Each structure stands twice: as structure tokens, then as C-alpha cells.
Image (cartoon, rainbow, N blue to C red):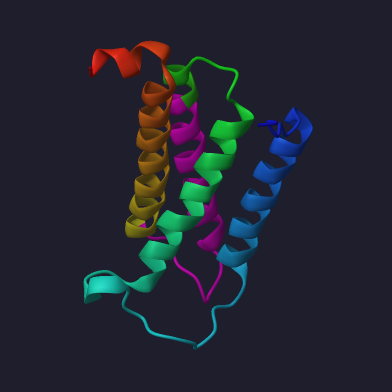
């Protein structure tokens, strides 16, 4: 089966697209649409959207940095993703229709950490000795 490889430039381009989409979504005036509570009615829908957006950022970063050692890659991915989330929150401070939120930043971190854990689990499953270790 032929494998499909995406070039390094394209991977970084995707990181830039995701980061730009997050920034635009964070600074535009929010509309009055849809429900305010997310699934299970516990957290606001925006927290789920934050986690999803920063999971996408973390995943594209991980793919762009895939040549690094896994542990270093995951630390960098989480730190950069959360750092970008902090930057976005700080950019919202002067906007009258937005606000700085530590809960939003926590949701960003949850998304990034979940991707890091899934990425690490995927790396473990792909190790040649992982299949024989469970037999």
C-alpha cells in the first residue's frame, strides 16, 4: 500500500492556518447563536470549542515537529499551544466584547494535553517491541 507523505513546508503551513483561524475566532465579535452549554450541560460550549481548537493546534504542531524525540516534541507542543492560548487571551483584554479567561486557558491546555497523550500512546503502539511486549 503506498504511503502518503506531506512535506515539512505543508505541515508548517497547516500550523499557521490553524493558528490564524484561532486568532480570528478569538478577536471577532461573537454572535448570538446557538446553545451556551456544551454536552452534559456542565461546561459552556465555548470551553469545548477552546479544547477542540487547541487540540487541532497541538496536533498540527506535533505533525510538524515529528522528527524530534517524542518526549521533547510533546513538551514543546503543549508549551507552545498553551503559550499561544495565553497570547490570545491577552489580546482579548482591550476588546470590549471579549474578556481574559483563565477557564478558557485551562480548556486550551486540556486540548493540547489530550493530543500529547494520544500522540504518545500512538507512538508506543507503533514501536516494534510493543506488539511482542503484550504477547
Q: Main secondary structure of the magenta part?
A: helix
Where residue 130 sits, quadrant-wise, is: top left
Q: Nearer the viewer, residue 109 or 123?
A: 123
Instruction: Inspect the magenta stretch and tell me whether residue 60 lies in it.
Output: no
Q: Position of residue 24 (x, y in %)?
A: 65, 63
Q: Position of residue 70 (x, y in %)?
A: 46, 19
| Relative to 2, residue 51 above or below | below
Kindly identify the residue that appears in the image at 45 percent across and 56 percent down.
52
Q: Nearer the viewer, residue 102 or 117?
A: 117
Q: Does residue 28 appear to the left or right of 2 in the view shown?
A: left
Q: Does residue 133 appear to the left or right of 108 in the view shown?
A: left
Instruction: Inspect the magenta stretch and tell me whether residue 85 lies in it.
Output: yes
| Relative to 19, residue 33 above or below | below
Where residue 120 sits, quadrant-wise, is: top left
Q: Position of residue 92 (x, y in %)?
A: 53, 62
Q: Does residue 40 appear to the left or right of 83 in the view shown?
A: left
Kindly identify the residue that appears in the image at 78 percent across and 32 percent down.
9
Magenta part of the chain = 74-101
Quadrant (top left, top right, bottom left, bottom right) of the C terminus: top left
Q: Does residue 37 appear to the left or right of 64 in the view shown?
A: left
Q: Position of residue 104 (x, y in %)?
A: 38, 58
Kindly identify the residue that appears in the image at 60 percent across and 18 percent down.
67
Kindly identify the residue that appears in the image at 59 percent across and 66 percent down.
25
Quadrant (top left, top right, bottom left, bottom right) of the N terminus: top right
| Relative to 71, residue 50 above or below | below
Q: Nearer the viewer, residue 99 or 29?
A: 29
Amino acid at each position: 500500500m503506498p504511503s502518503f507523505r506531506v512535506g515539512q513546508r505543508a505541515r508548517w503551513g497547516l500550523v499557521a492556518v490553524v493558528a490564524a483561524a484561532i486568532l480570528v475566532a478569538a478577536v471577532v465579535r461573537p454572535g448570538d447563536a446557538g446553545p451556551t452549554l456544551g454536552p452534559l450541560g456542565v461546561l459552556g460550549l465555548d470551553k469545548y470549542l477552546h479544547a477542540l481548537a487547541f487540540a487541532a493546534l497541538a496536533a498540527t504542531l506535533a505533525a510538524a515537529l515529528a522528527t524530534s524525540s517524542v518526549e521533547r516534541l510533546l513538551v514543546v507542543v503543549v508549551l507552545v499551544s498553551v503559550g499561544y492560548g495565553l497570547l490570545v487571551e491577552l489580546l482579548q483584554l482591550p476588546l470590549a466584547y471579549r474578556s481574559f479567561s483563565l477557564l478558557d486557558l485551562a480548556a486550551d491546555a486540556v486540548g493540547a494535553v489530550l493530543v500529547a497523550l494520544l500522540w504518545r500512546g500512538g507512538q508506543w503502539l507503533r514501536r516494534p517491541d510493543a506488539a511482542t511486549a503484550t504477547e
